[in-house]
Amino acid sequence: MTCEEAAEFVSALYDYETIPQAAAGHIGACASCQERLKEYIEIGVELRRVASMESLEEARPQAWEKRQAILSTWWQKGWETMRIPRFAFALLLMGIVGLSSGLTLVGVRAHARETMMMLNIALERGQVTPCGLSFEEKEYSDCGMSYGLSDGMLTYRIRLLSKESDRVELGVKTYFAQGVHSNEGAGEAMKSVPEKRFWFEPGKTLRIDVDKLGPITVTGEWLDHVPYFATMDLEHNLDPDANQIRMVSPILLKGDRVLYDTGGGIATTGSQQDAAFWMYVPGSGLYMLSLSPAKNAVQGHVAENRVSFEIDGELYQFVTAAPIMRGDTAWVLHLAGAHSPAGDSKQYSFGAGNLNPVIASAEAGK
Amino acid sequence: MTDDREVWKKISRGNADAFDAFYRENAPRLRGFLRQVVGNPQTAEDIAQDTFTDMWNRPNGFQPERGTLRGYLFGIAKKQASEWWRKQPSGTPAAEEEKSLCRTESASIMGDALNRLPEEQRTLLWLREVEGLSYAELALNLEIPVGTVRSRLFAAREALRKIWLRKRVEA
């Protein structure tokens, strides 16, 4: 072996890597290679010294607001609802994944006192969306949601401000985008919406007027525990309608590896035959779950809260926190080179739409 | 690694205290790394903030079995810095200013030598030598095979060694 051939192994040796016997033998007997190794050591030490001279002032204080829901920016006309709560079923999901079983509802966390204010916000057509608030559970100090209504998109945020006897003071922000069926821009718009304060008393109904939408009503009660479905309408999300796909906090697994964990996001489709749920994973592509087969789609087996399918001999699974659909067969199309239907192909995203328009959008990169 | 799993679990659940502790522990070193990569302290600060904000808002992608949480953080920052460089048209005043700053802020022969390397080599050497990322973590962050990490590290070391030896003679 020559010095030139051994040079790369000198670098590897310096990095604590094992090297071939021939290279090790050469380096041991070669003064030139040993000199190179010494220089690498000297360079490494000097680099760390230079790094130590960098001023490592403390990180400036930063307020980490609880993250907003994953707000999908793509909305296909004709869908009834697509709701994405801020906080949902991380614990439940872990339980499900860990147990590798069917849907498992774990018990609630009990508290000795009634500390959880469980609000129910009534929207149109009798739809109710819950909002769990607590002074003791920091992650439930507020709640927020974007909700697709027939006339547009409603976004709200409710904060728990104070408590006086049995009643609570709420800080409420609402924003209704009329004629809009996407929550794109809702987060930014909410920043300039003034917060209104209301006193709410359990057993009574609070009416909140939303500009351009009209009133929404709030009822609620004190609970002694944090229910796992504190930000979701349990009744309407556990039993999918016909021809409907309900993805509650979905994760996508490839073998035993998590490709994407939506961390509490929800995408609910309407009841069209060409209903489709999509999930975009940067570097891996677009995965579309549909009730009817797209060209090149593979068949998936649906069992309660999971859909299993194979692509190129690899097992994939969508696992969710609630039943997905009524049938036991679905179709999955994987487009490795597709763009994100949400627009930014560097970001993880998911959503719902009509099958062919979503495919066209993803392939066109729009 | 177990700690990383716990921390990640908390961050994924939106635990602001856990994320703030992670931020305070890692932000200064991340800024130091980014200053080397982009050359400008303010740009480095901006990218560091964007990196933490992205991680907080979209906690996806960390795989504990493939590396440390710190390595994952630096990987995100590296990608953001590369993206920033890509957006700088070569020859524009901004890009030239950054390059100029790269050369003038160093206080040692090694610092100057390092700044003469291409961004990719500078990044690779810093992550390995200063931050101690493993070959596997570097492979993951740079999206290249482990064998390529070895050859690229060698090329970067050789480039730096030659510049450093020359500057030492000049000095």
Image (cartoon, rainbow, N blue to C red):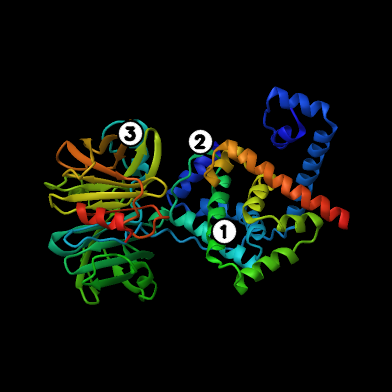
Q: Earlier in the sequence, mark 1 or mark 2?
A: 2
Q: Chain of mark 3?
A: A
Q: Is residue B10 above or below residue A215?
A: above
Residue B134 visible in the snapshot: no
Of residues A192 and A353, the one nearer the viewer is: A353
Q: Which mark is residue B65?
A: 2
In percent of width and height, residue B139 lies at: 56, 41
> Which element carries disc 2, helix, strand or loop?
helix
Q: Which mark is residue A48?
A: none
Label 2 CA crowd tier, 10 Å (few <14, some 14–19, many 20+) = few
Q: Chain of mark 2?
A: B
> Which element carries disc 1, helix, strand or loop?
helix
Label 1 CA crowd tier, 10 Å (few <14, some 14–19, many 20+) = many
Residue at 20% in and 52% down: A355
Residue A129 visible in the snapshot: yes
Identify the residue under disc 1: B81
Contact (CB < 8 A) between labels 3 and 2? no
Quadrant in the picture for the N terminus of chain B: top right
Identify the residue under disc 3: A312
Looking at the rendered structure, the number of numbered marks drawn on it comes to 3
Contact (CB < 8 A) between labels 1 and 2? no
In percent of width and height, residue A346 lies at: 42, 55
Q: Residue flagged by tag 2: what amino acid is it?
A: Glu
Marks 1 and 3: which is nearer the front?
Answer: 3
Residue at 82% in and 34% down: A34
